[in-house]
Image (cartoon, rainbow, N blue to C red):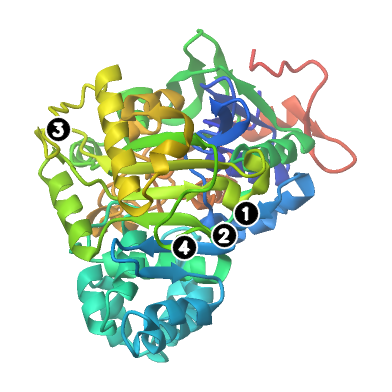
Amino acid sequence: MPDAVVIGAGPNGLVAANLLADAGWSVEVLEEQPEPGGAVRHDRGAHPDFVSDLCSSFYPLAAASPVLAGLRLEQHGLRWSHAPKVLAHPLSDGRCAVLDRRVDVTADSLEAFAPGDGAAWRRLHDAWQTLRPDLLGALFTPFPPIRSTARLAVRLRGTGGLRMARTLILPVRRLAQEEFLGEGGGLLLAGNALHADLAPEAAGSGGYGWLMSMLGQTYGFPVPAGGAGALTRALVRRLEARGGVLRCGQRVDRIVVRGGRAAGVRTAGGETVAAGRAVLADVAVPSLYGELLDPAHLPAQLLSDLRRFQWDFATFKVDWALDGPVPWRCEQAAGAGTVHLADGLDELTRFAAQLATGTVPDRPFCLFGQMTTSDPSRSPRGTESAWAYTHVPHDISGDAGDESLTGAWDAKEQEIMADRVERQVERFAPGFRAAIRSRRILAPPTLQSLDRNLHGGAINGGTAAMHQQLFFRPAPGTGRPETPVKGLYLASAGAHPGGGVHGAPGANAARAALRRPLAPGLAGAQRLLTHRDRTGRRQPDAGHREDGG
């Protein structure tokens, strides 16, 4: 019997398992897919000579995360790679806003839009430098982050106090109007806000766009050398070096509860895996409370609140193998790892409004990744491994492109939408389609088939809007990894602080489990079942079966 069973081998599940193993717990991770990683994987599905990340690709939150830094994954093979520039947002008139790790380069690109905008960016960056240590501490620690918040309140006074707090909850359009004379600064902020599902007019989108922009300014948008799965491999190597067990192809379909406490899990194959101390669930919130647990174990108020749970937008992604570099009209986009494709802030608002009304956008805002530019090992010299994703509604009521897309996402609809994405790229890179050697389409149902947590292609574990963040995440009055079932912890992006590859939900769940004492009667049984080797690591007795039998 392992001390802990972790459901799901995404980054949060693997982080949780590593931290429990570090504390001397025996840990077994069960993963439904044939390989670990969840949304952090790569393959050669677009072309045999090209590495394509299946879902996530760029990792500013991972670079900033003290959780991942503390795991020292570089000792287990992880190496980061950077594009020459972090991000570019070109416009059809040839102007381009550029985010660079050198603040002067970023400021100069915005100064070209309007005199004084470079200085405005530096002021926002100065505020970030002041707030960064405690802001990141508050972001990556369990809710409520009392110590970090107290220090942050002190630092806020040094950046304008309530005025700075007001700035951070502004809609990004209003923030841009107050801080910049030209369009460039708003483009960087608004495009980064739409990495989540925050429209330019949404409360808090300014603060989120500022956070993502400043993460890029300080840490870049790095990628794991060799492919996204290199991050997963490092987490798995570290776990196995500490005695943890990973079993893939094991779908969990029920959490076993006895006496109000999580006692283990049952797999789809009928196996019961007992857990001596805790079960940690790196699964989507609706799956945990709506499928894996019997409703009888949950408060009626929580079940009612979860009927109001809101997913983030669905995602449609295309991977390409390109015979050469992307022929950007604006050469400043050529060296950027990430390129945002929308012809101005108004087009971003138009895109978000179409999504809000259930309409498939006719000019989809695209996040475009130049992976060989970011990591030369991704494809043969002189070529480019690229991708773009955009958002679409979960429930489609109409198609602004007049091509009768319904959301069935059969082969015909996938091709229509992929062509629409390519036309959007062509607006900023004429001749792009002529460079395509092959493409691979990942529609919302495909993304969900690759990772059950990506419901309908939702990649954030639930909306990032203010009404489902902090103590509202995943439901009002929660915000922590503890669940109504003793010994069961939510370790996915559905918990605070939400989506992104940073490991915080998994770490928070592991810390909560480590703080909780053993249930009465279990401590003695645990001592009989396990012993410690000379390193102090908990090991099963010779007669104890690792399969939980």
The alpha-carbon separation of the residues under discs 1 and 4 comes to: 35 Å
Disc 2 marks which residue? 65
Q: Quadrant of the C terminus?
A: top right
- Name the amino acid type tagged 4: Glu
Q: Earlier in the sequence, mark 3 or mark 1?
A: 1
- Name the amino acid type tagged 2: Ser
Q: Earlier in the sequence, mark 1 or mark 4?
A: 1
Q: Secondary structure at mark 4?
A: helix
Question: In this rendering, which labeled residue sits more in front, label 3 or label 1?
Answer: 3
- Name the residue located 63 percent from the left edge and 38 percent from the top edge: 379
Q: Residue 313's quadrant in the figure?
A: top left
Disc 4 marks which residue? 331
Labelled pair 2, 3 in contact (Cβ < 8 Å) = no
Q: Residue 29's quadrant in the figure?
A: top right
The alpha-carbon separation of the residues under discs 2 and 1 comes to: 6 Å
- Name the amino acid type tagged 1: Leu
Q: Secondary structure at mark 3?
A: loop
The disc placed on residue 396 is 3
Q: Earlier in the sequence, mark 2 or mark 4?
A: 2
48 to 97, vertically: above or below: above
Q: Earlier in the sequence, mark 2 or mark 3?
A: 2
- Name the residue located 30 percent from the left edge and 18 percent from the top edge: 411
- Name the residue located 58 percent from the left edge and 28 percent from the top edge: 44
Q: Residues within 10 Å of mark 2 (few under 14, many from 20)?
A: some
